[in-house]
Image (tube, coloured by chain):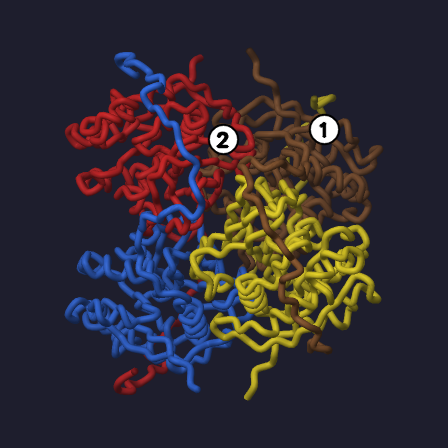
Chain colours: A yellow, B brown, C blue, D red
Amino acid sequence: MTPSPLKVIVWNEFQHERENDAVRGIYPQGIHTTIALGLADTLSPVRGALPLQIGTATLGEAEHGLSEARLADTDVLLWWGHKAHAEVSDAVVERVQRRVLEGMGLVVLHSGHFSKIFRRLMGTNCSLKWREADEKERLWVVEPSHPIAAGLGEYFELPNEEMYGERFDIPAPDELVFMSWFEGGEVFRSGCCWQRGHGRVFYFRPGHEAYPTYHDANVQKVLANAVQWAAPRVQKVDDCPMRPPLEKLSPKAVNFGKVGIVQSQGDLQ
Amino acid sequence: MTPSPLKVIVWNEFQHERENDAVRGIYPQGIHTTIALGLADTLSPVRGALPLQIGTATLGEAEHGLSEARLADTDVLLWWGHKAHAEVSDAVVERVQRRVLEGMGLVVLHSGHFSKIFRRLMGTNCSLKWREADEKERLWVVEPSHPIAAGLGEYFELPNEEMYGERFDIPAPDELVFMSWFEGGEVFRSGCCWQRGHGRVFYFRPGHEAYPTYHDANVQKVLANAVQWAAPRVQKVDDCPMRPPLEKLSPKAVNFGKVGIVQSQGDLQ
Amino acid sequence: MTPSPLKVIVWNEFQHERENDAVRGIYPQGIHTTIALGLADTLSPVRGALPLQIGTATLGEAEHGLSEARLADTDVLLWWGHKAHAEVSDAVVERVQRRVLEGMGLVVLHSGHFSKIFRRLMGTNCSLKWREADEKERLWVVEPSHPIAAGLGEYFELPNEEMYGERFDIPAPDELVFMSWFEGGEVFRSGCCWQRGHGRVFYFRPGHEAYPTYHDANVQKVLANAVQWAAPRVQKVDDCPMRPPLEKLSPKAVNFGKVGIVQSQGDLQ
Amino acid sequence: MTPSPLKVIVWNEFQHERENDAVRGIYPQGIHTTIALGLADTLSPVRGALPLQIGTATLGEAEHGLSEARLADTDVLLWWGHKAHAEVSDAVVERVQRRVLEGMGLVVLHSGHFSKIFRRLMGTNCSLKWREADEKERLWVVEPSHPIAAGLGEYFELPNEEMYGERFDIPAPDELVFMSWFEGGEVFRSGCCWQRGHGRVFYFRPGHEAYPTYHDANVQKVLANAVQWAAPRVQKVDDCPMRPPLEKLSPKAVNFGKVGIVQSQGDLQ
């Protein structure tokens, strides 16, 4: 019996690639397509890894390609956005958040740190220091036994990347998988895991549009692992039910009238 | 030299007390007033505890009593809301969130688990099980060395409270201070700490409007401690700056044109 | 191709069952045998669950049944001990610890909270409150999406168990899966996960020898899930290597002789 | 009324300084003396900071200067060791661990990562990569609102230090305050907080004996803050008490004889 595949959507705002020749030279069909092809070509060594059924979605599509029906049938969503965060509709963001809380996995990429969906799930600004200077980034594996690090060495390098530096304004991650060293002197928590509701969220730092990062084999491994790690384990719609007691309650003799009440003391300040 | 006091606001939607005789009997001037008086009367044993300058604010005031200027001058905000969460303006919620991220402390009380501000800072639904059955709650101290537990015994009891039961849909707390036992058979993470941005957030479970919970000496101790714990340690406005390198960067010979580009493979699925 | 099974050892001090008729009535071949049979009979719904190859080991065997060679070939070890913790040799404890740090999973059961191996991995006393009074325990699932909770309902009950109550002196768990409600009024963190080195550690509270807890279907599900969760993801022997620089270091002009040295000031106090 | 001072001991193995002229040139009276003088001269901006009563202790003293009576009267212990970890008596290590669990603070410095006391409290090997190459270290503040970072800028630099690189084999810290960038290409979690029992533990990376690190003003600030942060909040001797029920237990009709017992199935493997 073949196991059911994980249903994956790679979402991209898809603007730099259409407006900028250099970016289009690297990602002629869009970053989403390169990421999707990388996922299709990369076997994750994570135990129990499932085959993937991979689609893409972009900002310009109706409902940004993320209709209620499509999201309901999605296991893991990857998110790349940069200059058009403000154009993502609040209704779609709300929908994605709801799906994450129900159990869908979310992998947020690079400049997606400032996306509406990531900031909403984190509750913080998610700000950081940055610099575009074609510098070297070295990603160190902090937790070698974490599924997202499966098959990697002690570190891997990207010869040219945008710098992101601490302080990264996030809630302390549940698990810290990668830390980056930058040639220009900064460090960064580059691979961070959180659980929100029943869903798993992974933030992965590299991926500036001006560099061929998503063609890198190590980056592709990380994403392949992250998709497996983020796969739903349960799918539950949220509720907040009234529940009858499971034990017999004692008879009460409550008389609130007897409670001593503090009297007014004028201006409290 | 007298140390500067912590500036505290107790916020309340202040509706039950005006609409319901039983609630008004317990909190004739509003829950906020009782909480404020309790804070004023309770000495926190936390090391370095500062005197408090306590004010109140309610939903019905202009900007809900939380103007930009007033919040900018506030160190810790306590929040009680229940039936009117939807009436709190998004602009004020945004403002409170910004202040927390800048360093202001926030203490969220009881049914405030469903307030806009708490859900926004958590990123989750914050749902739970509940029951109003006048039952006994016993709060166990899980971390006796936590400042918020200072001066308490191993547990304390509330003879009548609303039940809140797990699963409580929150991000795993950074620190878990109290766990509740309910007569009807449930348990709950009743005292939870998180950091968001530079600010500290504490959620404290008890406090249903139909019971004299905020007249209880142990509850008053918890709130007095929580205000000291949540006091700002820094006050920083968020930014996301470009920064020049701290180290000399190596000359690069980047030629993105030579990067091998994967060609289209039609439908990725 | 059949996947390689996980190699599991259920360890038991195996004393109560030989000395006490009531305990022998419940576990005629020892607690380890009942646990092992339960594992053999229980299919874990965890994704990627592997078949198990299950053995047992007891205190009375040579090297307590945990020779260097056998441990080196073990993926997950379960540990039940109570009255004979002191009889476990330090050499074997050291060996088990080393294997956990290298990647082996460890599931510590009930009174194993006071075992040498658990206290050594936690660094704390692991003390708690207790009472043997045949009372009801209800275990609430705090993280329904955690693999160890796979296939369980919102809670499950054990009609008679020993009580363990907070404060449980452990490092705050990385993940809290279960919380217990006890009829006598206490609560407990009953299912706790930690990572130590490359290995995963799970503590599971129930399992007093005087009750048929390990015959319970829900308990068996928890253990079956825990074994899958704790399975090694890497196996690495620890080292602490000197490493040459990855980047060219700048020439230095260090002159320590110029450093201003604080002179003695007599009694520092 | 003057507040009681915190009683602090700076412990040092005190060997390099007596055997090596270069080290003695930097720390003529021993690293412990320089650290102690730095603490005495540095005002911590942490709220509620207490005055310090500072003493020192060294390996060569009777009981390494850490008698039962002296430790019982100590609030915070700082620990510097490197080449003589094995010479520290297990009895003293046990005693220090007990005091930490009771509430005493512990600040572990640099090569103390391999001390018996640190490894015992962590439960892991605490290994790492290292290199002595006089290279630059830059420590980034990851949590600017943490008390240990009070009064520091966004980062500070040490012109020459030993390199320590990830993977650092520790339990994930409860709070990560500093991350280091090294000129040679590595990163490190350089300021890590844990709670163990009722005590707080802080590990601070810099401090190789061949460099004047403890004369650095920023390092002195960190240590001054760490001592205040690590000060005990409670002092409790551990116990593991039997406790009578707080609630009335129901009558039981337990009949273990009726429990169905699984029969032997021969070799379980």
Quadrant of the drawing holding the C terminus of chain B: bottom right
Label 2: which secondary element: strand
Residue D55 against residue D71 in the figure, above or below: above
- Residue A157: percent from the left, percent from the top? 51, 55
Please give the name of the residue rendered at 29% of the width and 44% of the height, measured from the top-left corner.
D114
In this view, the residue in front, A128 or B18, is: A128
Residue hosting label 1: B72
Residue C113 relative to residue C251: left or right? left
User: Does residue C26 appear anywhere in the picture?
Assistant: yes
Chain name for mark 2: D
Please give the name of the residue rendered at 29% of the width and 52% of the height, measured from the top-left corner.
C120
Quadrant of the drawing holding the N terminus of chain B: top right
Quarter of the image for residue D206 reads: top left
- Residue D255: percent from the left, percent from the top? 36, 75
Please give the name of the residue rendered at 52% of the width and 44% of the height, measured from the top-left corner.
B157
- Crowding near pointer 2: few (<14 within 10 Å), some, many (20+)? some
**Cα separation between marks 2 and 1:** 30 Å
Residue hosting label 2: D156
User: For the residues carrying marks 2 and 1, which lies nearer the camera in this image?
Assistant: 2
Residue type of the residue flagged with mark 2: Phe
Label 1: which secondary element: helix
Residue C65 relative to residue C122: left or right? left
Please give the name of the residue rendered at 63% of the width and 59% of the height, measured from the top-left corner.
A212
